[in-house]
Amino acid sequence: MRKQLVLTASGRDRVGIIEEMTELLLRYEGNVESSRMVRLGGDFALLMFVSAPVEKIQDLRCALSEVHYAKYDVHTRLSEVVEPEETSAVPCAITVLGADHMGIIHQVTRYLSEQGINLETMTTEVSAAPMSGTPLFAMSAVVKVPPQLGVDDLREALEFIGEETGTDTKVFPHIDEE
């Protein structure tokens, strides 16, 4: 039998971080079931959903704790695989693009939260516009829209938020790529 844990780690970016982490996982028969990794400025952050044999999970957590004190900020949390509920929620993709300013993420996510819309994934980035160098904000997200709301209602509300924030918002059906 296997147990699952969520592993987060961050620290100064350098070559070999993933190789070191996966080597440590292998020592305890750990398997990466899902992960996200990204370089942020001069740092590197990873998020992994890991499984390991029940009898080795605590030793793995201890080994990861030692890595925490030696090199990176590492945290683990015991978790479990949760079977998705049968629901008629509609998966949708959201994009938000425009000039960067404070509060865009908060305004969009506040609305989503108020409507009971669950965020499945979200990425944001600020980059320089090609000609002017103006900071441009880009967000993409996948959400589950509850049936009582409706995709058209979400689209209309996010267009209104886009007008308020000076951004271009789009909502479209999301096709799961798994």
Image (tube, helix red, strand yellow):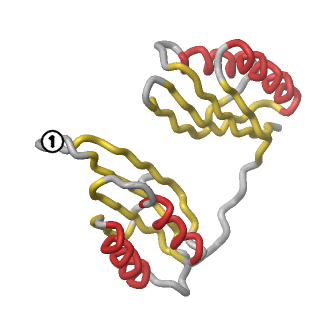
Q: Residue at x 49, y 19 (%)?
A: 13
Looking at the rendered structure, the kind of residue marked 1 is: Pro
Q: Residues within 10 Å of mark 1 (few under 14, many from 20)?
A: few
- Tell me if residue 142 comes above or below residue 23 in the rendering: below
- Tell me if residue 76 comes above or below residue 157 in the rendering: above
Q: Is label 1 in a helix, a strand or a loop?
A: loop
Residue labelled with disc 1: 130
| 97 or 173, nearer to the observer | 97
| 49 or 160, nearer to the observer | 160
Q: How many marks?
A: 1
Of the 4 image quadrants, the one containing the N terminus is top right
Res. 176 in view: no
114 lies left or right of 174: right
Q: Residue at x 58, y 70 (%)?
A: 113
| 174 or 105, nearer to the observer | 105
Looking at the picture, how far across and down is residue 16, in whole percent?
51, 13
Q: Residue at x 35, y 67 (%)?
A: 165
Extreme-bottom residue of the structure: 148
Res. 59 in view: yes
The quadrant where residue 22 appears: top right
The quadrant where residue 117 appears: bottom right
25 lies left or right of 137: right
| 25 or 178, nearer to the observer | 25
Looking at the picture, how far across and down is residue 137, in whole percent?
33, 51
Extreme-front residue of the structure: 102
Looking at the picture, how far across and down is residue 175, in whole percent?
40, 62
Looking at the picture, how far across and down is residue 33, in whole percent?
61, 38
75 lies left or right of 130: right
- Tell me if residue 19 comes above or below residue 142 in the rendering: above
Q: Residue at x 33, y 70 (%)?
A: 162
